[in-house]
Image: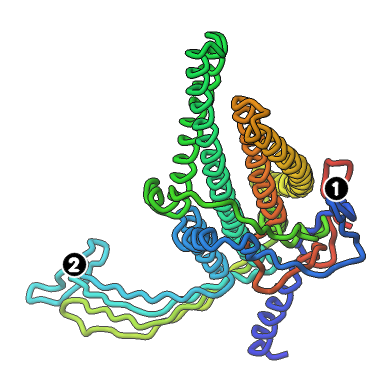
Amino acid sequence: MNNRYLTPLTILSLVWLNACTPTRVGDQVALNSPTSWQHAAHAKTAQTTEAVDLKIWWQGFNDPLLNELIDKALAANHDLKIATARVREANAMVTVAEAALYPSLDFSVSGGQEKRIDRIVGVPSGQGIKLITPTADAVSGGLAARWEIDLFGGRHLEAEAAAAQAEGTKEGLHAAQVGLLAQVATNYLELRGVQQRTDILQKNIALQRERLRTLQVFLKAGLANEADMARQQTLLRGTEATLPVLTNAEQILIHRLGVLLGEPPESLEKRLAVVGPLPVAAPSIPDLLPSDLLAQRPDLRLAQTEVSAAAASLGSARADLYPKLVLSVSGGVGALAVGGFPSLAESVYALGSGLSAPIFNAGRIRAHIAAADARLDQVAANYELTFLLALEDVENAFVAHRSATDSFGQLTEAEASAEKAYRLVDALYQRGAGDYLAVLDAQRSKLAVSDERAKAETAVSVAMVSLYRAFGGGWTSASSDRVVSIKPRYGNQRLTRSHGKHLEKR
């Protein structure tokens, strides 16, 4: 075969071999996922697979102010801004890594004047030949191209690792958004709960002051004693001492909301200091499988990208064991003018190739491979652990919600009973058959139960927020990716854990 056809065919063959990438490593990790939730009120079975949109779960509370606060937080929160900047940085690094896959083309131009003692020229003169060192003016310029043929896929795998890391930063952004939404909703609901309890406490304080005033009247009339007065004063002072605690909690929650919204801590004081009720409505409990967490929770998706990046980095490290081929070409124009002689101008070019292979490097490449393999073991174990923690998170949220709901139901019944008792005692008093102090005591008991009911009601709403946070609510994938099994990206290899020690190809 003619040599002029042999070189192009050789290059095309090398490019084709490049696509085979024999050093690839699989990125699949086998996870043991339950088929249902243990503590869910209505556990979903593996046979039902309808998708659930969790993106705007907070709107289920039907609270316009909460919706407004969350919109502002999504637009101005500084944690989201930092995470967004990290995404831009990672995307730029992907371009840097992918640039190594293509030839580089550089333009250069140089020129100058030089006089060197090793450049001696004999010039005829009246006294014979005269030796001089002439001044030379040299100018050159041209283009140079260089391309490292990625024979064994090392550069491609480096680019894939960078792409996986960039995907990881996107999942980090999603995780920050999920956490932000949960924080805003939790702080807002707790604020409304504290304000509701403060209102109840102020009514209780007013009632106890009225009871103390009544005892003072009774004491003057000889119907009470000093011990009754002392007990009532103690109860009143103890109740009043709770008020600064709730006021402090209210201010802290308002300040936290201000910072979450990207504003000074005191910016929301005037608006949120206006007492508002807890939302009456609540979003329904999400009906998802445990395996759905793999597609929905950003921390799990982030852990998956870490496995993919580590697998690609291991393959890239293995590629260093194989030869590297570099093609280069350059061409341009150069001119040289030596004083006293005609100038010389000529086009120049160079074609070249080089092949290098490691022979001895004191174990550096093998150590790099071992480190990359250990890194893959780490991130695979972290992925398994993250999944277990996610399952724990959801189960705990289910338990907290059920416990708060049961407590709220019981306290609601207790509040109704206390209200009934108060009305009966008050009716007796109105007919002259009861004691006014008994009326005040019944009313105080009712307010005490109302305070506990308000705490339980807040706990129910906060537990619902925790449940949606545990499910990764607050974002959706643009591609509507609901796939829960992890497909291998690098060929048909599969990574499984072998007695918790090594990752093996199968």
Classify mark 1: helix, strand or loop: strand
Classify mark 2: helix, strand or loop: loop
* Mark 2 or 1: the one toward you: 1
Q: Is residue 468 above or below residue 256?
A: below
Q: Residue at x 20, y 70 (%)?
A: 113
Q: Residue at x 53, y 65 (%)?
A: 91
Q: Is residue 489 visible?
A: yes
Disc 1 marks which amino acid? Arg
Q: Which quadrant would the N terminus be assigned to in this image?
A: bottom right
Q: Which quadrant would the C terminus be assigned to in this image?
A: bottom right
Crowding at label 1, few (<14), some or many (≥20) Cα neighbours within 10 Å? Answer: some
Most foreground residue, 278 or 122: 278
Distance CA(mark 2)–CA(mark 1): 75 Å
Q: Quadrant of residue 223?
A: top right
Find residue 335 and report its horizontal and vertical position in percent. Answer: 29, 81
Find residue 209 and report its horizontal and vertical position in percent. Answer: 49, 26
129 to the left or right of 39? left
Sequence order check, earlier mark of 2 and 1: 2
333 to the left or right of 125? right
Find residue 403 and report its horizontal and vertical position in percent. Answer: 77, 41
Disc 2 marks which amino acid? Thr
Most foreground residue, 116 or 428: 428
233 to the left or right of 372? left
Q: Quadrant of residue 364?
A: top right
Q: Is residue 332 above or below residue 460?
A: below
The image's mark for residue 133 is 2
Most foreground residue, 284 or 473: 284
Q: Residue at x 60, y 25 (%)?
A: 437
- The residue where tag 1 is placed is 497
